[in-house]
């Protein structure tokens, strides 16, 4: 994990087996809102949309949908959905948590289904249920974690046991819970004494989130070009894990840290519109406001025993790379992949199986919907923030962002 710190920008790159798999950036003046708690004031209730707008002190009012006002446990919700005007009124103060960043012309989306992520669990103070990550596959371990969660939670509390809690000691998980309970009490105390709109609690910095959500303490290492950030990372690790083994290195080389680790070269290749596969094939990614389209081409690859074999191998290479690029670019929303046509159904299923397998490594929720009638593969990925590329790009002034030069404007 490579972290490049500048006065106004922090960038993070995650490398697995020599390949760049995640990249994120955060400006000091525009820190992520997702996960932060606000005390807001309802400024408008819209019966026709079953939603309300809440002033949380940002440039745009936050959007609060009726489902995010009801109890977080489905079994505790009424059979008939109540009207939003029966739940909220203009001028009412409410504590909300940001679940989606402002995107384009839309303000942030907020919820009253509160959650505080820790190292081993996600604490939901009012959810009243226990769940275990779907990525924990062993039934015996799932049952152990479920029983542990039921034993350590108080009445009305909710817990999600994260994937990293697998085989973890009960004392560590309970310690994580106590820390998160303390955070929640602090948020509640601040809400009682604060005047809306105001910030009650901000989620961790990009470096701390990286350590909390991604790090394998036994096998990973962290390189940071800032001594201050490196020391803060070590302190956070000590607090979170009571003596972690993750090596934290302060980089002091003569060239920029991203250049030294080959990150810049990979970023230039992986954020291009056309990405060449190692096999010689290629994939082209085009993003619109509503969805992303991915086109797969054989290119120079002709290595199969037959046309069907060549096509299938190219699609398999592409599926693996597409999963990595979606995660790396943090692409969200609807994604349509135009794989090269395959005649045999077993080959189509093989491509889907590989894509699903590769996407399980993604921390953001993904779902492969299936093949459309036109032979396109449809998938979705939860959209929480603007795509990473937005931070480092802008629309072309000549073509207006459509990727084609407007010759009329040149006369």
Image: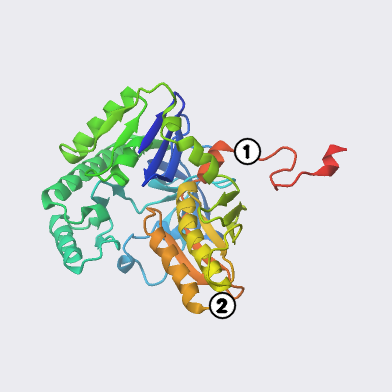
SS type, badge 2: loop
Percent from the top left, x then y, of residue 300? 60, 57
Q: Which mark is residue 369?
A: none
Relative image position of residue 325 (x, y in whole percent): 49, 51
Q: Would residue 233 be seen by someone viewing this image from the given angle? A: no
Q: Earlier in the sequence, mark 2 or mark 1?
A: 2
Judge whether 41 appears above or below 292 on screen: above
Q: Which residue is mark 1?
A: 394
The N terminus: image quadrant: top left
Residue that carries the numbered disc 2 in the rendered image: 343
Nearer to us in this view, 397 or 125? 397
Whether residue 117 can be seen here: yes
Q: Quadrant of the C terminus?
A: top right
Residue 81: x and y, percent? 43, 67
Q: Left or right: where does residue 106 sit relative to residue 31? A: right
Residue located at (56% from left, 47% from top): 106
Q: Which of the 4 quarters of the picture holds residue 398?
A: top right
Q: Count of labels shown?
A: 2
- Between tags 2 and 1, which lies in front? 2
Compute the Cα span from label 2 to label 1: 41 Å
Q: Residue at x 30, y 63 (%)?
A: 134
Above or below 18: residue 293: below
């Amino acid at each position: 994990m490579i972290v490049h710190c500048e006065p106004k920008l922090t960038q993070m790159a995650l490398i697995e087996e020599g390949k760049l798999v995640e990249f994120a950036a955060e400006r000091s003046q525009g820190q992520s809102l997702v996960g932060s708690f606000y005390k807001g004031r309802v400024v408008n209730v819209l019966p026709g949309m079953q939603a309300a707008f809440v002033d949380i002190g940002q440039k745009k009012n936050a959007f609060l949908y009726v489902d995010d006002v009801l109890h977080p446990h489905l079994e505790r919700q009424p059979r008939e959905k109540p009207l939003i005007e029966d739940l909220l009124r203009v001028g009412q103060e409410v504590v909300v948590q940001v679940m989606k960043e402002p995107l384009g012309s839309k303000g942030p989306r907020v919820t009253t289904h509160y959650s505080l992520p820790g190292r081993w669990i996600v604490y939901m103070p009012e959810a009243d249920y226990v769940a275990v990550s779907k990525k924990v596959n062993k039934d015996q371990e799932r049952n152990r974690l479920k029983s542990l969660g039921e034993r350590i939670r108080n009445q009305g509390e909710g817990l999600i046991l994260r994937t990293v809690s697998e085989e973890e000691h009960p004392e560590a998980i309970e310690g994580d819970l106590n820390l998160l309970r303390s955070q929640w009490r602090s948020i509640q105390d601040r809400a009682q004494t604060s005047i809306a709109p105001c910030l009650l609690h901000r989620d961790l910095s990009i470096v701390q989130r990286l350590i909390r959500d991604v790090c394998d303490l036994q096998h990973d290492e962290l390189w940071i070009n800032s001594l201050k950030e490196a020391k803060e990372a070590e302190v956070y690790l000590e607090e979170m894990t009571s003596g972690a083994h993750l090596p934290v290195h302060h980089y002091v080389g003569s060239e920029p840290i991203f250049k030294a680790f080959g990150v810049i070269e990979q970023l230039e290749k992986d954020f291009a519109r056309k990405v060449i596969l190692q096999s010689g094939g290629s994939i082209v990614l085009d993003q619109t406001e509503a969805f992303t389209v991915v086109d797969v081409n054989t290119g120079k690859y002709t290595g199969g025993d037959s046309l069907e074999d060549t096509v299938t191998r190219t699609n398999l290479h592409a599926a693996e790379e597409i999963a990595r690029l979606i995660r790396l670019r943090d692409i969200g929303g609807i994604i349509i992949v135009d794989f090269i046509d395959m005649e045999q159904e077993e080959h189509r299923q093989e491509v889907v199986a590989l894509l699903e397998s590769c996407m399980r490594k993604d921390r953001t929720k993904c779902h492969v919907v299936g093949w459309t009638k036109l032979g396109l593969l449809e998938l979705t990925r939860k959209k929480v923030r603007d795509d990473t590329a937005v931070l480092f790009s802008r629309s072309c002034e000549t073509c207006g962002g459509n990727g084609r030069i407007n010759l009329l404007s040149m006369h």
